[in-house]
Image (cartoon, rainbow, N blue to C red):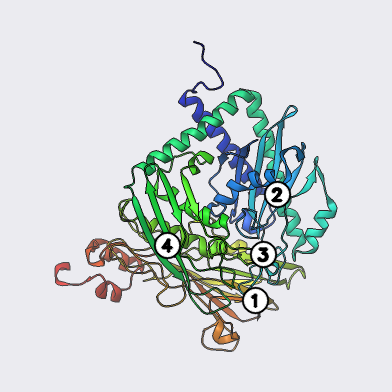
């Protein structure tokens, strides 16, 4: 009996070559964006994701950029094709959209999608999702921490063709840029995204020329099945059962009340269901998560506790089912706000899934990370150039201690994977001087393994500047720090403080300006000589602090990570057994 070459299993070496080729095309796309973008959020922060799809909307390649867009990347093509119709695409088209209710993350995330034709037939799509630093709305930087509806968060765009057969639709471009505070950067950053698609398209066509369309399609299909089998084997190794976890965020930016989240993770054989029933209804403020954010947090968590080498394509997602009740804080309904859901809510949701699985996977989990991106957005007219600028600034915090080691220090939340913008770049672009950037001692949760340290950044508004600032942080209140596991202590809290010129003490923004939330506020004007301190939260600890290796405690004290007082009081350092 003859074998159908279309279904014949390919050699593992061939599959590895094709998987690496698809991955490298996505990486090349990302490098193009980094090298050509105008804004630090792209060329320094790398706040974007790059993906490849087949013509059916299955993701066949994804590079290691920003996990915040995991689910948005997964949904963008399939939902766009369903809405526009596959026959609407022509060679050279580029579709743009950022609608958070259409599978997106939050409104600053802009997706661009380009069809790839091989000959006369559609092969698939190249796409990327990137966070534009300024898209209008009520707040500079489009992060309105007190927004109560999506219209205050920026310009919302349904799936539309911004490029038609390689010709820009300039009327649409003009409409977009007229609604953004920094149109020059919008032009540069969107063109960086679109240009990267052209680079990816050329590389994909070269791959098809080299191996043939039929071979690549076969290999891509088998890679999806391979990833699914591998993920199912990982899930099958988790003891069957239902595992629950709950926690709260301190407030939503509009009302000074906590918001409750609850998750149940059910493992049944080689499948897994993550159910968010029991979470509060959606709130007035912008910490609501879209379905795309919640799904991304779930995938992010599962990828953290399973084998890292599973190829990240649609197959790896198939064994994971998600229940997110519409109209809840994990699946916001129109026109509810959600800009903070992708930065502040996502990391906590991911940590909740990990913590729920802690009894089943004690050797693979970690305590909660700091869990706040410490979003600090600011803009105004630059005193040296007279041009309007806007910037989206993030801070790294402490990651949770693991069952086998300490947490990482000063790392962006696990949904970000973004890089730190160098002080030299920051001060060159903006009228703020960085007076201090340091690790904060005692900010890591205590434990047999210590939580990672948070950071302190001290800004000064420079001579002649007027700066409008917004912030969206969490974990600044007592009792809301990153939780520990197995007896580990909570991580240190976040803070954002201000000192006006001529004042002697730092105060919270609530104390200084009367904002409802001390960690979430919008459009406060600072002047030359004013100072701001941002302290990022530390990660939770793991295990009994008294079980920590004495040599590690001594090293922490020597390095300044733990104070001598905390070492004595929390870790028992300096007791008779230490000599």
Instruction: Measure the C-alpha gap from mark 1 to mark 3.
Output: 12 Å
Q: Is residue 148 visible?
A: yes
Q: Quadrant of the C terminus?
A: bottom left
Q: Which residue is mark 4?
A: 369
Give the vertical position of 16 relative to 418 (above or below): above
Label disc, if present, on residue 91 of the rendered structure: none
Give the vertical position of 44 relative to 441 (above or below): above
Disc on the earlier residue, 1 or 3 = 3
Instruction: Measure the C-alpha gap from mark 4 to mark 3.
Output: 30 Å
Q: Residue at x 31, y 47 (%)?
A: 239
Give the vertical position of 115 relative to 70 (above or below): above
Q: Which residue is mark 1?
A: 462
Label 1 SS: loop
The picture places residue 32, in percent across and down from the top left corner, at 65, 45
Give the vertical position of 509 relative to 98 (above or below): below
Q: Is residue 395 visible?
A: no
Label 2 SS: helix
Nearest-to-viewer mark from 1 and 4: 4
- For residue 398, side relative to residue 459 (left or right): left
Disc on the earlier residue, 4 or 2 = 2
Disc on the earlier residue, 4 or 3 = 4
The residue lying furthest to the right in this view is 171
- For residue 254, side relative to residue 202 (left or right): left
The picture places residue 10, in percent across and down from the top left corner, at 50, 23
Label disc, if present, on residue 429 of the rendered structure: 3
Instruction: Measure the C-alpha gap from mark 1 to mark 2.
Output: 31 Å
Instruction: Measure the C-alpha gap from mark 1 to mark 4.
Output: 33 Å
Disc on the earlier residue, 3 or 2 = 2
Nearest-to-viewer mark from 1 and 2: 2
Q: Which residue is mark 2?
A: 192
Few, some or many residues within 10 Å of mark 3 (<14, 14–19, 20+):
some
| Contact, mark 1 vs mark 4 (Cβ under 8 Å) | no
């Amino acid at each position: 009996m003859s074998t159908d070459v279309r279904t014949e299993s390919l050699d593992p070496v061939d599959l590895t070559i094709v998987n690496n080729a698809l991955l490298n095309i996505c990486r090349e796309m990302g490098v193009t964006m980094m090298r050509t973008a105008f804004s630090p959020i792209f060329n320094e922060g790398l706040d974007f994701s790059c993906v490849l799809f087949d013509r059916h909307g299955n993701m066949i390649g994804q590079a290691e950029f920003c996990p915040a867009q995991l689910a948005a990347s997964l949904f963008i093509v399939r939902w766009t094709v369903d809405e526009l119709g596959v026959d609407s695409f022509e060679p050279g088209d580029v579709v743009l959209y950022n609608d958070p209710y259409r599978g997106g993350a939050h409104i600053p995330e802009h997706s661009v999608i380009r069809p790839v034709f091989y000959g006369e037939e559609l092969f698939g799509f190249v796409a990327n999702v990137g966070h534009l630093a300024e898209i209008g709305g009520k707040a500079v930087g489009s992060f309105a921490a007190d927004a109560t509806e999506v219209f205050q968060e920026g310009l919302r765009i349904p799936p539309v063709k911004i490029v038609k057969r390689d010709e820009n639709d300039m009327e649409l471009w003009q409409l977009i840029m007229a609604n953004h505070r920094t149109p020059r950067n919008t032009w540069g950053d969107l063109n960086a995204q679109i240009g990267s698609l052209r680079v990816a398209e050329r590389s994909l066509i070269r791959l098809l020329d080299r191996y043939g369309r039929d071979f690549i399609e076969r290999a891509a299909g088998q890679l999806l099945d391979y990833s699914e089998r591998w993920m199912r084997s990982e899930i099958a190794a988790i003891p069957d059962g239902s595992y629950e976890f709950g926690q709260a965020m301190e407030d939503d930016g509009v009302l000074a009340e906590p918001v409750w989240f609850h998750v149940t993770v059910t493992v049944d054989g080689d499948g897994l269901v993550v159910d968010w029933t029991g979470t509060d209804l959606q709130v007035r403020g912008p910490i609501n998560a879209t379905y795309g954010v919640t799904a991304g947090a779930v995938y992010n968590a599962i990828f953290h506790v399973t084998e890292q080498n599973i190829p990240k394509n649609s197959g790896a997602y198939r064994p994971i089912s998600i229940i997110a009740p519409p109209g809840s804080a994990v699946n916001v309904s129109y026109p509810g706000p959600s800009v903070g859901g992708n930065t502040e809510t996502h990391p906590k949701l991911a940590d909740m899934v990990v913590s729920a699985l802690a009894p089943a996977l004690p050797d693979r989990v970690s305590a909660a990370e700091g869990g706040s991106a410490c979003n600090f957005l600011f803009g105004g007219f630059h005193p040296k150039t007279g041009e309007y600028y806007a910037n989206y600034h993030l801070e790294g915090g402490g990651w949770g201690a693991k069952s086998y080691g300490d947490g990482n220090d000063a790392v962006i939340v696990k949904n970000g994977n973004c890089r730190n913008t160098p002080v030299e770049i920051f001060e060159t672009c903006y009228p703020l001087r960085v007076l201090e950037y340091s690790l904060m001692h005692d900010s890591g949760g205590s434990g047999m393994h210590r939580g990672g340290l948070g950071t302190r950044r001290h800004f000064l508004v420079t001579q002649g500047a007027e700066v409008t600032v917004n912030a969206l942080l969490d974990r600044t209140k007592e009792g809301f720090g990153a939780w520990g596991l197995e007896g580990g202590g909570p991580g240190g809290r976040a803070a954002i403080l201000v000192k006006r010129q001529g004042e002697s003490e730092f105060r919270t923004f609530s104390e200084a300006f009367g904002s409802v939330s001390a960690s979430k506020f919008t459009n406060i004007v600072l002047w030359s000589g004013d100072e701001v301190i941002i302290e990022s939260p530390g990660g939770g600890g793991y295990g009994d602090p008294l079980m920590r290796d004495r040599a590690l405690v001594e090293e922490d004290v020597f390095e300044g990570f733990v104070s001598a007082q905390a070492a004595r009081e929390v870790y028992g350092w300096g007791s008779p057994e230490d000599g």
